[in-house]
Image: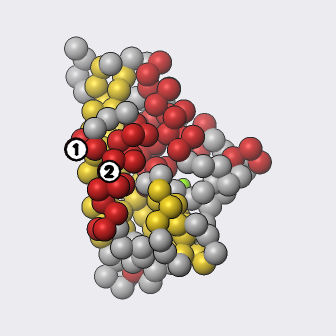
């Protein structure tokens, strides 16, 4: 058994009206949503980068460039499938995920159980091995003004 590997991922997207609020693989009820070339799911992007980073692989932006037409409005759960396939090929699996999400809207607390179980489903681990905390920006900077959402994820990988 090799030593477990840790990975860190951070992602930020601007928030705007008339966008589905796709976060953590779910569409949450909210009058703003993340703006991005793909669906803008900052939570899944941060987790994918942490997963890929822990395995010593290229980051999400290298695997799925945001200037490629094929990635326009692409559902981020497809990035999760690709990241999981990539680490499986390297004999690794996800053992735990911890995420901090900073935004003014949507309020994440009511959706925590559903988000944990959806993220667990996408990365093939039990919901109790996925944690997610929502924080506000205390009125400071773009997060505090409600203009953006930022996710920071830490992931542990172990041997398959
Ligand atoms: Mg992103």
Q: Residue at x 53, y 78 (%)?
A: 31
* Residue 154 visible here: no
- Structural distance between the alpha carbons of marks 2 and 1: 8 Å
Residue 47 lies left or right of residue 99; in this view the side is right
In this rendering, is residue 29 above or below 24? below
Q: Are marks 2 and 1 in contact (CB under 8 Å)?
A: yes
Which residue was labeled with disc 2? 116
Viewer-proximal residue, 101 or 124? 124
Viewer-proximal residue, 132 or 6? 132
Task: Decide if ligand 1 comes within 8 Å of the CB at mark 1.
Answer: no
Which residue was labeled with disc 1? 128
- The quadrant the N terminus occupies is top left
Q: Residue at x 46, y 80 (%)?
A: 146
Dot 2 alpha-carbon crowd within 10 angstroms: few under 14, some 14 to 19, many 20 or more: many
For the view shown, which residue lies furthest in the top direction? 1
> Residue 15: percent from the left, percent from the top?
54, 73
Q: Residue at x 71, y 52 (%)?
A: 72
> Residue 32: percent from the left, percent from the top?
54, 76
- The quadrant the C terminus occupies is top left
């Amino acid at each position: 058994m090799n030593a477990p590997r840790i990975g860190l991922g951070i992602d930020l997207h601007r928030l705007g009206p008339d966008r589905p609020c796709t976060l953590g693989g779910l569409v949450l009820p909210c009058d703003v949503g993340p703006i991005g070339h793909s669906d803008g799911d900052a939570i899944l992007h941060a987790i994918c980068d942490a997963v890929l980073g822990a395995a010593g692989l290229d980051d999400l932006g290298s695997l799925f460039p945001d200037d490629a037409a094929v990635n326009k409005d692409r559902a981020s759960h497809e990035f999760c499938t690709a990241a999981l396939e990539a680490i499986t090929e390297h004999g690794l699996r996800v053992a735990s995920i911890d995420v901090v999400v900073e935004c003014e809207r949507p309020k994440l607390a009511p959706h925590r159980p559903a988000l944990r179980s959806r993220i667990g489903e996408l990365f093939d681990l039990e919901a109790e091995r996925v944690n997610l905390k929502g924080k506000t920006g205390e009125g400071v900077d773009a997060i505090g003004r409600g203009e953006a959402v930022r996710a920071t994820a830490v992931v542990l990988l172990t041997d398959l």
